[in-house]
Image (cartoon, rainbow, N blue to C red):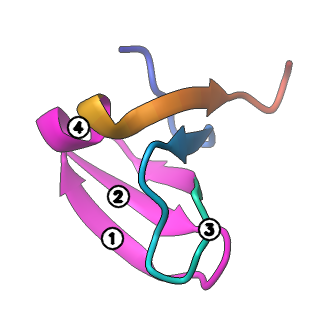
Amino acid sequence: MDVRVGDQILTKKPHPCGASCFDVLRVGMDFKIRCTGCGREVMVPRAKIEKNIKKILRGEE
């Protein structure tokens, strides 16, 4: 899956605050993502986040 720093991702399950859109801050074996609703930053393993991604939103599209 081609996810880059600066992309926004829509997830299948929402964050506990209710938002389901996240900004990608770091990519590697772990992803660092920031919730667009409450601003909390979370580190998630690559395998878990790739299963949970519904759609990737890029800034240049």
The residue wearing badge 3 is: 19
Mark 4–mark 2 distance (CA, rounded to whole Å)? 9 Å
Mark 1–mark 2 distance (CA, rounded to whole Å)? 6 Å
Residue 43 picture location, percent across and down: 25, 64
| Magenta stretch: includes residue 42 | yes
Q: Quadrant of residue 36?
A: bottom right
Element assignment for label 3: loop
Q: Which mark is residue 32?
A: 2
Dot 1: within a 10 Å radius of its alpha carbon, few (fewer than 14), some, or many (20 or more) residues? few
Dot 4: within a 10 Å radius of its alpha carbon, few (fewer than 14), some, or many (20 or more) residues? few
Q: Can residue 1 be seen in this view?
A: yes
Q: Height in image: 47 above or below 61?
A: below
Q: Do the residues labelled 3 and 2 touch (CB within 8 Å)?
A: no
Q: Residue 28 carries which label?
A: 4
Residue 19 picture location, percent across and down: 62, 68
Hey, what amino acid is under mark 2? Answer: Lys
Q: Earlier in the sequence, mark 1 or mark 4?
A: 4
Q: Earlier in the sequence, mark 1 or mark 2?
A: 2
Q: Earlier in the sequence, mark 1 or mark 3?
A: 3
Nearest the viewer among 10 and 1 is: 10
Hey, what amino acid is under mark 3? Answer: Ala
Element assignment for label 2: strand
Residue 5 picture location, percent across and down: 52, 39
Q: Do the residues labelled 4 and 2 touch (CB within 8 Å)?
A: no
Residue placed at 62% from the left, 42% from the top? 6
Would residue 33 appear left or right of 21 to someone viewing this image?
left
Residue 28 picture location, percent across and down: 23, 37
The residue wearing badge 1 is: 42
